[in-house]
Amino acid sequence: MTYEKQKVACVAEERPELSSILPILMGGNALWHRTSVKSLKAIIDSGFIQPNLGQFEVTYSQSCQCFGRSIGAVCMFDFNSATPEQVLFSADNWGGFLVDRGAATVWIRVDRDKLDPNNIVSSEDASALRPTLIPYVEAWYRGPIPKAAFIAFLVIKRTAIAGHILVPNTASAMDVIEEISIAWEAEQESDEAVRHSNGEFTLAGAVKASASSRER
């Protein structure tokens, strides 16, 4: 068995939760953009996903030097052009982005057919320039993406990837997503309170608890 096949088999075995979400990510002729609930509201209000040229905060410091910013493009994910094996092979690189924006992370499903194909840059196109990228599934779109190209919003629960909800792009979508986010935040805080009462802390939780005790 080759290294690639061995890694794909390991990911499929060790991350069974991906099996519930991959059919959505890989289905249809779509591109995806990951964001937070707060940022989604700003996107919907403005009518566009704008390339981040430094006007928005970043989640990771390395994003300031990312390939997308260097070409004035929106960072996207393209699970549709890769094979299932390629998607699983690179899951260690993209899997963390599924749930990294609080209690609820939002993935915007974008209709590729409503975008200018000349402005879509694939990871294969970019590889010749040798940028740091997520193999097979990372993509970029040069210029803003209008909300008219949005198909739906995949809202993913931080504590349970399988607990995702696909919200159609309707006039009430933002209200629905905010309600989901509020409920999940309350649930997460309740779960954390129970764990803390039992003396169970994550590293982040321990730091937060230590800071709170010092403030008191």
Image: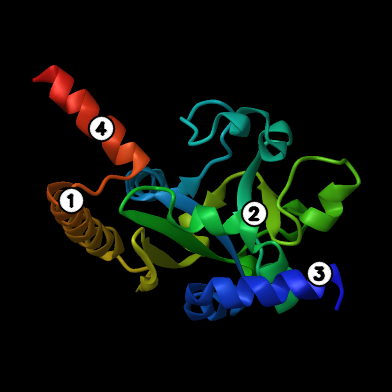
Residue in the picture at 65% in, 69% down: 113
Question: From the viewer's perspective, is residue 49 above or below residue 67?
Answer: below
Q: SS for tag 4? A: helix
Q: CA distance from mark 2 to mark 4?
A: 27 Å
Kindly report which numbered mark, 2 or 4, lies closer to the viewer in this rendering: 4
Q: Residues within 10 Å of mark 3 (few under 14, many from 20)?
A: some
| Amino acid type shown at disc 1 | Glu
Q: CA distance from mark 3 to mark 1?
A: 39 Å
Residue pushed farthest front?
199
The residue that disc 2 covers is: 93
Residue in the picture at 55% in, 81% down: 23
Mark number for residue 177? none
| Amino acid type shown at disc 2 | Asn
Q: CA distance from mark 4 to mark 1?
A: 13 Å
Mark 4 and mark 1 lie on one chain; the one further toward the N terminus is 1
Q: In front here: 85 or 40? A: 85
The residue that disc 3 covers is: 4
Q: SS for tag 1? A: helix
Answer whether labels 3 and 2 touch (C-beta < 8 Å).
no
Q: Residues within 10 Å of mark 4 (few under 14, many from 20)?
A: few
Asked if residue 83 shows in the view, the reply is no
Q: In front here: 106 or 176? A: 106
The residue that disc 1 covers is: 189
The residue that disc 4 covers is: 208
| Amino acid type shown at disc 3 | Glu
Q: Quadrant of residue 153?
A: bottom left
Residue in the picture at 52% in, 54% down: 96
Q: Residues within 10 Å of mark 2 (few under 14, many from 20)?
A: some
Q: In front here: 109 or 212? A: 212
